[in-house]
Image (spheres, rainbow, N blue to C red):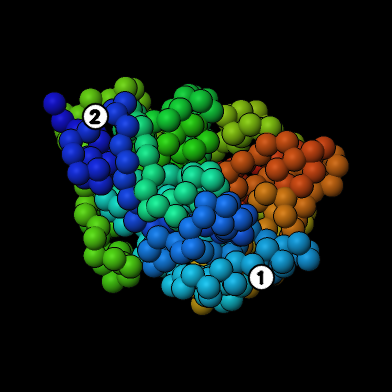
Amino acid sequence: MGKTFAEKVLGKAAGESVSAGQVVIVEPHFCMSHDNAAPIWGTFKKIGVDKVWKPDHLVFILDHAIPAPTDKHAENHKQIREVVKEQGIRYFYDVTSKGGVCHQIMCEEGFALPGLVMVGSDSHTCTYGAFGAFSTGIGRSEMAATWATGQIWFRVPESMKITVKGKFNKGVSAKDLILKIAGDIKADGADYMSIEFHGPAIEEMSLAERMTLCNMGIEIGAKNAVCPPDQKVLDFIKPIAKTDEWEAMWADEDAVYAQELNYDLGDIEPCVAKPHTVDNYAPIGEVKGTPVHQAFLGSCTNARIEDLRLAADILKDKEVAVRTIVIPASWSVFRQAMKEGLIDVFLDAGCVITNPGCGPCMGNHEGILAPGETCISTANRNFKGRMGNKESNIYLASPMTVAASALKGEISDPREVL
């Protein structure tokens, strides 16, 4: 009987053959924390250990509230900088023009690598599965314990195989596919499972599209989500890999899955997730014409250069009807967008562009909503109060749908403006 991806990677890390349901103790390779490194440090100190395990395996990235919008955030950042200095943390991305959203940085800086076990104190750490890593989010106490001991336990997850074929129609993207999957299986449909994306359509997808799929694995309950580490991945990582301990691994052809799903991209259409859950799926026709007050193009889900290009194609030589906030995923993406003239497209269209970071995605700053307002967003969550006010509404959509909606001031079908 063959092994799934999760069984293979966790088995290698544990030094033994493992099967779904088995509990293993492993040493993760990279451990990522963002602004929450400060409260994690508070828990770490209570453990009674003076030094973190392998400081060169810890990665700190400030992104959730940068530059600091309040004195409380500033104090938090100050403490992290002190910890970095005290503990000799090698990989620290401060509030500079070298950083960005943590999950984007982990991928573009060569931390997300095939076959590694990676953990992060953020739910969307599963993004790194786009590069063939077993990556998952953990709690703050778990992270503090991992800093101290270099070990963490997992129950080897059962696996779900999602096979995708076909090609996207005009105006449709990977975000529409993952929202459709969420609508089909619901928020708990893959609870504590390892989602494997298979099929010719996945092979054709860019790394950015795969990142969008894996990023939202947690929104359907998955422990991790992963795409095959094919030649696209290998070509990308080889010049930038932060370690040579990675290994390209994939499931055996005769692996056994708890559930299998199949999708044809030709059947996918533009869609949204309606308030206030990610699995509240609706095809664009059901919500078309809904007024919006704000459009947000950003977050760790859809703010890569490919996403900005899609939005700019729609906004070029036009003007938005509502306030539209654009936040590139990293300064590297920002610079590339400048070179390609995309920033000018957004500015000419009336958009506001802010520094790379999470911004309004979780309601910290740079676009908090007022009571009764509605935002259409490329982010990954639309829970009540997510963007700073419990009396507001959030619709999740693709970059193309967000851009089209920004033009009209109401939820719109991107196929009609392309």
Q: Nearer the viewer, residue 363 or 72?
A: 72
Image quarter of the N terminus: top left
Q: Nearer the viewer, mark 2 or mark 1?
A: 1
> From where the camera sits, is residue 248 visible?
yes
Mark found first going from the N terminus, 2 or 1: 2
Q: Residue 31 lies in what quarter of the image?
A: bottom left
At x 47%, y 49%, the residue is: 145
Q: Which mark is residue 78?
A: 1
Q: Residues within 10 Å of mark 2 (few under 14, many from 20)?
A: some
Q: Which residue is mark 2?
A: 19
Question: Residue 240: percent from the left, percent from the top?
Answer: 32, 70
Going by the picture, which residue comes out furthest to the right?
371
The three-letter code of the residue at mark 1 reads Lys
Disc 2/disc 1 C-alpha distance (Å)? 44 Å
Q: Is residue 339 left or right of residue 223?
A: right
Q: Amino acid at mark 2?
A: Ser
Q: Nearer the viewer, residue 254 or 50?
A: 50
Seen in the picture, residue 241 relative to 404 is either above or below; the reply is below
From where the camera sits, is residue 210 visible? Answer: no
As helix, strand or loop, the secondary structure at mark 1 comes to helix
Q: Is residue 347 above or below residue 265?
A: below
Circle 1 Cα neighbour tier, 10 Å, few/some/many (<14 / 14–19 / ≥20): few
Q: Could you tell me which residue is drawn at 66 percent across and 51 percent down?
A: 361
Instruction: Residue at 57% x, 52% y: name it.
Output: 46
